[in-house]
Image (cartoon, grey):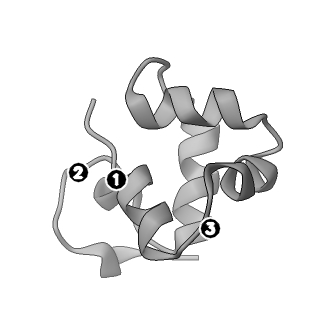
Amino acid sequence: MNLRIRQLREEKGLTQSEVAEVLHCDQSLYSRYELGLRQLPLETAIQLSDYYQVSLDYLVCLTEDPGKYRP
Protein backbone atom coordinates (compact mmCIF):
# COMPACT_ATOMS: atom_id res chain seq x y z
CA MET A 1 0.00 0.00 0.00
CA ASN A 2 1.28 3.43 -0.90
CA LEU A 3 1.40 5.89 1.95
CA ARG A 4 2.35 9.55 2.14
CA ILE A 5 3.66 9.35 5.67
CA ARG A 6 7.29 9.97 4.74
CA GLN A 7 6.37 12.87 2.45
CA LEU A 8 4.20 14.47 5.14
CA ARG A 9 6.86 14.00 7.80
CA GLU A 10 9.57 15.54 5.63
CA GLU A 11 7.34 18.47 4.61
CA LYS A 12 6.95 19.29 8.32
CA GLY A 13 10.70 18.94 8.93
CA LEU A 14 10.19 16.16 11.46
CA THR A 15 12.38 13.18 12.27
CA GLN A 16 11.10 9.63 12.43
CA SER A 17 11.76 9.72 16.17
CA GLU A 18 9.55 12.78 16.63
CA VAL A 19 6.63 11.19 14.79
CA ALA A 20 7.17 7.89 16.61
CA GLU A 21 6.91 9.76 19.91
CA VAL A 22 3.52 11.16 18.86
CA LEU A 23 2.38 7.63 18.01
CA HIS A 24 3.83 6.18 21.24
CA CYS A 25 6.01 3.68 19.37
CA ASP A 26 9.72 3.41 18.78
CA GLN A 27 11.53 4.85 15.77
CA SER A 28 12.36 1.45 14.28
CA LEU A 29 8.68 0.48 14.11
CA TYR A 30 7.79 3.81 12.54
CA SER A 31 10.60 3.33 10.01
CA ARG A 32 9.10 -0.01 8.99
CA TYR A 33 5.75 1.72 8.38
CA GLU A 34 7.46 4.25 6.09
CA LEU A 35 9.36 1.55 4.22
CA GLY A 36 6.25 -0.57 3.76
CA LEU A 37 7.79 -3.43 5.72
CA ARG A 38 4.96 -3.37 8.24
CA GLN A 39 1.30 -2.63 7.62
CA LEU A 40 0.06 0.59 9.18
CA PRO A 41 -2.81 -0.19 11.59
CA LEU A 42 -6.02 1.76 10.99
CA GLU A 43 -5.83 3.38 14.43
CA THR A 44 -2.31 4.62 13.68
CA ALA A 45 -3.38 5.89 10.26
CA ILE A 46 -6.17 7.85 11.93
CA GLN A 47 -3.68 9.32 14.43
CA LEU A 48 -1.40 10.41 11.58
CA SER A 49 -4.33 11.82 9.61
CA ASP A 50 -5.31 13.92 12.63
CA TYR A 51 -1.71 14.92 13.34
CA TYR A 52 -1.06 16.13 9.79
CA GLN A 53 -4.66 17.38 9.34
CA VAL A 54 -5.20 15.49 6.11
CA SER A 55 -7.84 12.97 5.11
CA LEU A 56 -7.23 9.24 5.35
CA ASP A 57 -7.78 9.11 1.58
CA TYR A 58 -4.89 11.53 1.10
CA LEU A 59 -2.70 9.65 3.56
CA VAL A 60 -3.14 6.40 1.60
CA CYS A 61 -2.84 8.06 -1.84
CA LEU A 62 -6.48 7.69 -2.91
CA THR A 63 -6.78 11.41 -3.62
CA GLU A 64 -4.49 14.31 -4.40
CA ASP A 65 -6.63 16.65 -2.28
CA PRO A 66 -5.29 16.91 1.28
CA GLY A 67 -7.98 19.42 2.19
CA LYS A 68 -10.76 16.93 2.82
CA TYR A 69 -9.78 16.68 6.48
CA ARG A 70 -12.57 16.84 9.03
CA PRO A 71 -11.57 17.07 12.72
**Which circle, 1 or 2, is nearer the viewer?**
1
**On the image, numbered disc 1 is attached to which residue?**
4
- Amino acid at circle 1: Arg
The C terminus, quarter of image = bottom right
Q: Give the image location of residue 57, x and y in percent.
A: 30, 55
- Amino acid at circle 3: Tyr
- Amino acid at circle 2: Cys
Which residue appears at 42% of the width and 52% of the height?
6
Q: Earlier in the sequence, mark 3 or mark 2?
A: 3
> Looking at the image, how many numbered discs can be counted on the residues?
3
The reply to whether the C-beta atoms of the residues labelled 1 and 2 are less than 8 Å apart is: yes
Q: Is residue 65 above or below residue 35?
A: below
Lateral position of residue 55 relative to residue 64, left or right:
right
**On the image, numbered disc 3 is attached to which residue?**
51
Give the alpha-carbon distance from disc 3 to disc 1, as whole Å: 13 Å
Callout 1 secondary element:
loop
Task: Name the foreground residue: 6 vs 66.
Answer: 6
Q: Is residue 4 above or below residue 14?
A: above
Which residue appears at 73% of the width and 58% of the height?
18
